[in-house]
Image (cartoon, rainbow, N blue to C red):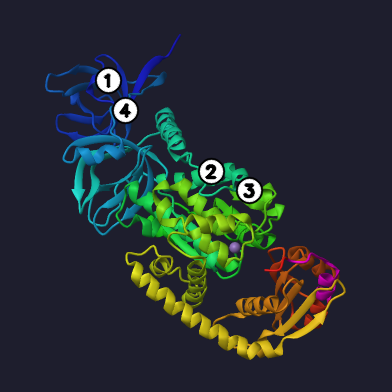
Amino acid sequence: MSNVIVYRLSPACDLSDVEVGAIYVGRVQGFAAFGTFVQLTDRLKGLVHKSNVRTDHDERDEILVRVKQIRPNGNIDLEEVILPSYEIKDVVRKIVSTRLADLAGRIGRTVTVMAEIAQIKQTSGPTIFTLVDESGTENGAAFVEAGVRAYPEADLGDIVQVYGQVMQRNSQVQIEIASLTVLSGEEADTVRRQIEEALERRAEPPEIPLLVESEVMSLLRPQLREVAKQIRKAVFVSQPIVLRHHADADGICSAVAIEQAVVSLIRESGGDFDADYFLFKRAPSKAPFYEIEDITRDLDFATKDLVRYGQKMPLILLTDNGSTEEDEPALRQAQVFGLKVLVVDHHHPDAVIDQYLAGHVNPYHVGGDFGITAGMLGTELARMINPAVDEMIRHLPAVAAVGDRSEAPERQRYLDLVADRYTEEECKEMALALDYEQFWLRFNDGREIVKEILDLGPDHDRHVRFVRLLVEGANAMIADQMEATMPHVRERILGNGARLFLLDVEIHAHKFTFPPPGKTSGEVHDRLCRLHPGEPVVTIGFGPDFAVLRSRGVLMNIPRMVRELRTEITGGGISGGGHLVVGSIKFVEGMREQVLEGLIAKIANAEVSVPARP
Ligand code: MN
């Protein structure tokens, strides 16, 4: 014998879905002298007259009811039924829902939207639900009592059907929620799939050519597009983005280009007027890798924002860092929290970190090298994220290229691209100004000041005056440092013919000021290279427990030398890395002589290639 069919109405159902004679699953809503009110959905209720009540109930109890009649005024008369066994069938209904992107044209009207909850913020007044569908993001406000969470059954990530009036508040569109229903089962799956599929299409980056001809970057296009797509998707679903970058001119240019693209995309896609402030954070990393200190801060903020503001966990994007084994400890922490990490870097990558990444753009993957700077990659990526910022950011690769001393052919192409606006000298000045200003900014991003330096601000003349002043300041301090330092440089000629210069930056350079040890060594190296044109030159600036290396015309692999020294010198406490020919090494103070001599022996064994005379 087949079971009796009992229907369950989905939240989207209305009176036209109710059939006289059919049996439904209802929920007891309340009691009156003449009977019991039963809800068939949040919005549909009927009455079981007391003569038709068969058992005792409490509020919220489930109850089976047969529809006796539907009166002309829409009132539904019900009777309770008791069934020993039955089968439930869901009545799913496709309702006419409004896309969030179309709300602005429906101010004052009542709408139904199907969306995912992207954020739940409890204010001192209403509860604010940030809703996301395939078309955009808007807020809905639900009020039960001041400061009390409305619809506590609704969680972050739930698919909901929201019904309410479209209002305009402070130039922002918002739904005053009259009812919010968490969808489940097939219905939720269908909506989720629709949103997913549409997002997938919407997140697809536009097909645009690179700014300049580049074999390496053409080969990297699929990876760039994939990373761009994931970033666009994060923006569309109101997932916060944390952008970490190396705190030098190249890293800043890369990050600022991406920042302009992401921030403008967030503003375009609706939501709060200040969404770009809490959905996007750019933060410089002092080290050229994602340090434990960085991930600790990022996790601290992310977990607090989740609890306090009901925000999703962020997408992490690393640029000009993130691809070496030094990043692994931090990436392992990110993995524990399920954070998605994307990397856009031009440091020599270690394969071990790819298991932690959801996307990785790196010129070494396609036979290129560090000459393709992070600023070039970041700018091309930014244009894929949002082509609208193209004009604004197209000079950033040139600044990055001169800042990072790129010798790739792309350097000149990017300089040529903007030659009508900036000379090479002006690009160099912007790069120096960035380095100098970041020194004073320390761990701060300096969002607006940095834009001023890169001429993304409102006043070009002020930009010119500001950069001039910063460059003056930087050059004066560099000159001071060189005056104190250069007389203490010691020279050795190595077995392979390279000139090695050694400098103790701890005792022969000003400390805790600009230029810091890395840049001081770089400046010394540049001067020595000019003094010895056409010759291989290596400069080591060392302190008590660290050394920074710069080289020209010596084919070194610093990350590999560091790894070898770590196994060869017991008790050296060695770590470090960087680029192949520009990098740093750390060790314990008591082992400095052994480590430096070991390092020098390796440099003496490296092949030299005579650099071209300028
Ligand atoms: Mn770089």
Q: Residue furthest top?
A: 1
Read off the magenta span.
Answer: 598-611
In space, the residues marked 2 and 3 are separated at their CA atoms by 14 Å
Which labelled disc corresponds to residue 63? 4
Which quadrant is home to the C terminus?
bottom right
Along the polypeptide, which appears first: circle 2 or circle 4? Answer: 4
Residue at (32, 64) in percent of width and height: 458
Along the polypeptide, which appears first: circle 3 or circle 1? Answer: 1
Q: Which residue is mark 2?
A: 225
Along the polypeptide, which appears first: circle 1 or circle 4? Answer: 1
Which quadrant is home to the N terminus?
top left
Residue 465 rendering spot, x and y as whole percentages: 38, 75
Of badges 1 and 2, nearer the viewer stands 2
The amino acid sitting under disc 1 is Asp
In space, the residues marked 1 and 4 are separated at their CA atoms by 19 Å
Of badges 2 and 4, nearer the viewer stands 2
